[in-house]
Amino acid sequence: MTRKLPFFILLLFLTLTWSLAACGSTPTPEPTPVPLPTWTPTPTSAQLVHVDATPTTQPPAAE
């Protein structure tokens, strides 16, 4: 019980401050929309490093 007490007090404090802020006399102004940056696709590590599956050394030719 003693370990949960600080968490309970913090939760109660946050709930009270949130409710008081929500019931404030001055309404909060609407936030201006921030334009999102244009997303450019970046190559993944699999695209950056191309591993060839074929062995580099050729097996000896069958005679």
Image (spheres, rainbow, N blue to C red):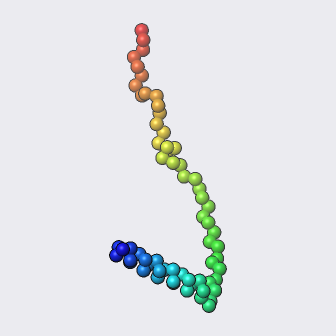
Residue 4 coordinates in the image, percent (x, y): 38, 73
- Quadrant of the image containing the C terminus: top left
Relative image position of residue 43 (x, y in whole percent): 53, 49
- In-front residue for pair 62/10: 10
Quarter-of-image position of residue 58:
top left
Q: Is residue 63 above or below residue 34?
A: above
Residue shown at 59%/83% (left/top)?
Answer: 22
Where is residue 13 shown, x and y percent of the image? 46, 82
For the point 64% across and 83% down, which residue is it? 29
Residue found at the very far front of the displayed protein: 1
Report x, y in % for residue 38: 62, 61
The image quarter in which residue 31 lies: bottom right
| Image label count | 0
- Residue situated furthest bottom in the rendering: 25
Q: Nearer the viewer, residue 59 or 27?
A: 27
Q: Is residue 45 above or below residue 26?
A: above
> For residue 61, which quarter of the picture?
top left
Q: Residue at x 47, y 31 (%)?
A: 53
Nearest the eye: 22 or 43: 22
In the displayed orientation, state which residue is furthest to the top.
63
